[in-house]
Amino acid sequence: MPAKLSVNVNAIAMLRNRRDLPWPSVTGLGRLALAAGAHGLTVHPRPDQRHIRFSDVPELRALIDDEFPKAEFNIEGYPSEDFLQLVEKHQPEQVTLVPDDPSQATSDHGWDFAAQAGLLKPVVARLKKGGFRVSLFADADPSGVNTARDTGADRIELFTGPYGACHDDPAGAEKQLEMLGKTADAAIAAGLAVNAGHDLVVDNLPLLMRGIPKLAEVSIGHGLTADALEYGMTGTIKRYLKACGW
Ligand SMILES: CC(=O)[C@@H](O)[C@H](O)COP(=O)(O)O
Ligand SMILES: NCC(=O)COP(=O)(O)O
């Protein structure tokens, strides 16, 4: 089965937040994405709420529960106490832990598993006890994978930013893909499932899918939102599903 597509609505929220007005509607565009066949929605709340607001989370939870019960909600973020309470309240199907500090413009690295296993283990245990699937944001580096597994997580999410940055450098993209593939192989051998995300677009998805055919899920926001301005959300989801191999 091809990788499932989870649509990250952070960029839509950021556009809305330019004004004190309710459009573009995060929930409305999330509805269009799910109606067009996307498998889930992703949000990445940050403490300053510059993208998604905490108040968006219950609306998106209700959208999935009421209208798309087979879809999944994925909440990504740094495991602060506020974040953990947010996910415990709104019960996403998947929690993706990301080592962002609040000043970062966007996510730009995965966990340093050797150094941060002590922080992650009790957090993963708490989330697993709450019934959540837990995924850990990971750089393309197979050496950290066993430590990631030992935290008790179910999945890793490969950070594909450096791959996405090679949009005009095919040789560089191949190099990045090789490391991503090795990391995915090591993770699967360790018993973890593998997601991927960051700077994925219609043009770089087919190569990623061929290189890592066992990917479980991709979460895509920035590039997909840019495409939606051009093609509309419904047309964009169809393009992205096709690029994923559906
Ligand atoms: C973990 C990851 O790569 C994404 O969640 C990314 O952080 C998207 O969030 P922004 O669109 O807010 O940068
Ligand atoms: N986990 C990655 C994600 O949700 C979206 O990242 P991007 O497509 O906005 O770069």
Image (cartoon, helix red, strand yellow):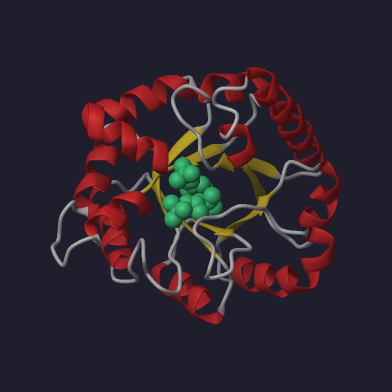
- Give the percent coordinates (x, y) of residue 141: 79, 43
- Give the percent coordinates (x, y) of residue 108: 60, 52
Q: Residue at x 55, y 42 (%)?
A: 197
- Give the percent coordinates (x, y) of residue 244: 48, 24
Tell whether 121 sits left or right of 50. right
In this rendering, does residue 151 appear at all?
Answer: yes
Tell whether 162 sits left or right of 22. right
Quadrant where the C terminus sits is top left
| Nearer the observer, 220 or 173 | 173
The single residue placed furthest to the bottom in the displayed view is 81
Please tell me in which quadrant of the rendered image residue 36 appears.
top left
Q: How many marks?
A: 0
Q: Residue at x 33, y 36 (%)?
A: 226
- Give the percent coordinates (x, y) of residue 63: 25, 55
In this rendering, does residue 1 appear at all?
Answer: no
The single residue placed furthest to the front in the displayed view is 168
Image vertical order of residue 52 relative to residue 31, above or below: below
| Nearer the observer, 117 or 21 | 21
Image vertical order of residue 133 relative to residue 206, above or below: below
Quadrant where the N terminus sits is top right
Please tell me in which quadrant of the rendered image residue 207 appears.
top right
Tell whether 16 sits left or right of 44. left
Q: Residue at x 24, y 37 (%)?
A: 35
